[in-house]
Amino acid sequence: MAAADNNPAAILAAEAEARSGAGPGGPAAPAGPRGRGPRGRDTTAYLRYAGGKLGGALVSMFAVLVTSFFLFRLIPGDPVKQMTGGRRVSAEQLAAMRQEFGLDDPVWKQFTDYVGNVLTGDFGTSYQFHAPVMDKITEALGPTLWLTGTAYVLYTVIGIWLGTRTAWRNGRLGDRFHTGLALTLYSVPSFWLGLLLIITFSVGAGPLPGLFPTGGMESGDETGFAYVLDVAHHMVLPVLTLVAVGYAQTLLVMRSSLLDEMGGDYLTTARAKGLRDDLVRRRHAVPNALLPTVTLMFVNLGTVVAGAILVETVFSWPGLGGLFYQALSVPDLPLVQGLFFVFATAVILMNTVADVIYPLFDPRVGR
Amino acid sequence: MTSDTAATAATPAAAKSPRALARARRRHSAVRFWRAYRTHKAGLIGLGTLVVIALAALFAPLLVGADAQSVTDAPGEAMRAPTGEFPLGTDQFGRDLLALLVWGARISLTVGLLAAFLSVAIGTVVGITAGHFRGWYATVIMRVTDWFLVMPTLVLAIALASVMDRSLWTIVVAIGVTTWPTTARLVRAQTLAVESRPYIERAQALGGGHGHIMTRHVLPNVMPLVLAQTTLVISSAILTEATLAFLGLGDPTVVSWGGLLQDAREAGAVSAGDWWYLAPPGIAIAVVALAFTLCGRAVESVLNPRLGVTR
């Protein structure tokens, strides 16, 4: 959202919307203080808006660089001591290491070197794996996208579908049940749910045999179609965990924004025209109510990359989240730093995409 | 909500003094609030649950004994499934898990509440000042807020907790400084809405300074929103605390629910299928988080924070 936006009502509406998923203020959303006309034909205004958002994203990216540099380099004391981790090292070796990592240079020099390296895709070398951080990240990116992407698609679809149904049947038993269930699952720690699923379905509880593997992504000896089935088999429990804790938010936003729309006069009009209830919902109410959900979908998309640290750890999934946990327990600073950068970048990127394309869905937003 | 206590002493017999009027009005609105809140069944259930758990946490030493956390003179054998003597079983040191669960409530609630208050306090101050002052200050501060808003909260909290010492305060600070931006944005929006009303202009015309307007006019008006936000932040703070403790970033010397889960995992409870060790702490976390969420939603729908929106 624009920092220089000084139209209180518009901000309030946008924020209430982003938070509780209320509608975008209805058709009465006031025009900006400068009295702009309809935005649809005003391409330059849109380009200026999009450019502003992109510029903001660049500023944010720079801030991420600054943070990842200072947070991990200046706070934990002497990185060389961290690297050697208590092993006996001679003073000459320490000096050589300081030289190698450029730790004797002035801070600004270290920082410009760091920025230059990151821009060329060089995040340094992992202490733990003795391999370039970039390689470890690209290696783990695929499994993460595969796992969290599947979960993302599932919980978005389920959340929208259930949110629509519960709002339309507002107050009935089904609505109360689904809202209650979603809120409960939303309050459950994801790693705990994962552990319980492992106990129940992998280790086997009571008469139940171990149906699914306890962790990992593949058994190792399969090829071709059998390999695909094997990976799918490994994915069941982690995806189930992610979907269970994830769909609640989409459901609640979709539900409340549809509830907001349901009082709208245009729905009464649609009904007065003699449209069936089903069509009123599908053609009139849902498309409007989807707008806040679209925002949420993009916000969630940014967290797809970072969203599964716990679940990946619990299920030993060979993705970025599991890697982050491993790096953290050493601590493997270059790897932590690189992953931090990747996670933050993904969120910023997706938020920017959402900001830029949102006015195309809803012409009331954007300038 | 803000200065009731100060007003009490200064009220003379006459009911016409402004302070007495204000007090009566506050009492009246508190009663009205409670009447409306009472109609939310889910909110009442949440509140009741919280009262029970808070009492259990407060009286933990009386309920389960003060030495429940001691590893050296543990009362039972290690890793025993629930029996009559130990209704939830024992951990790898032979400690009573029920007692640990009750003690854990103290840490989890304390950290959750402190972190939420820190987060909401930062958010409120930033939000009100960013809404009140215009120009470069607001621009800069909102840039910073936006930046914090896009950072993956958990990743940042983990990073902060991992570079600081292992202590409860680290967890509180890590959660507090990473979760305030949502509150700041909400409070700023509400501040802008409040400040566009005529009575602010009147106050300015009568010579009210920045501090007076922010604390006397804006703050009371954003308090309902802040209150609702606090209850919601608490539940996510408790979840984050459990997550950080589970990752081994918590204070190793105290027992918290997340720490219990980590202990369980390290003791091999997962591969041994010891669900009785794992289930209770997670249920406790979920129940408290859910209770706060239910309260928060009830408060939110009673107060309707979108007061200033034209509709």
Image (cartoon, coloured by chain):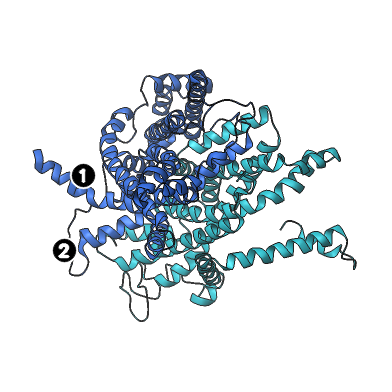
**Of helix, strand and loop, which one carries label 2?**
loop
B55 left or right, relative to A120: right
Residue, far bottom: B84
Rendered colour, chain A: blue
Q: Where does the image place residue A341, in percent across and percent down from the top left?
A: 42, 31
| Front-most of residues A284 and B68 | A284
Q: Check residue A258 in the rendering and tell me which mark sits there, or answer none.
A: none
Q: Mark 2 touching mark 1, by CB under 8 A?
A: no
* Mark closer to the chain start, 2 or 1: 2
Q: Residue B79 occupies which quadrant of the picture?
A: bottom left
Which amino acid type is shown beneath numbered disc 1? Met
Q: Where does the image place residue A36, in percent across and percent down from the top left?
A: 59, 25
Q: Chain of mark 1?
A: A
**Of helix, strand and loop, which one carries label 1?**
loop
Pointer 1 residue: A217
Q: Looking at the picture, does residue A296 appear above or below residue B286?
A: above
Q: Quadrant where the C terminus of chain A lies?
A: top right
Q: Residue at x 56, y 70 (%)?
A: B58
B191 left or right, relative to A286: right
Q: Where does the image place residue A46, in percent across and percent down from the top left?
A: 49, 23
| Front-most of residues A259 and B82 | A259
Which amino acid type is shown beneath numbered disc 2? Pro
Q: Residue at x 29, y 30 (%)?
A: A138
| Front-most of residues A167 and B207 | A167
Q: Residue A14 occupies which quadrant of the picture?
A: top right
- Mark 2 and mark 1, same subunit? yes
Rendered colour, chain B: cyan
Q: Where does the image place residue B267, in percent across and percent down from the top left?
A: 31, 61
Task: State how far apart marks 2 and 1 are (Cα).
Answer: 20 Å
Pointer 2 residue: A209
Q: Looking at the picture, does residue B68 appear above or below residue A63?
A: below
| Front-most of residues A217 and B102 | A217
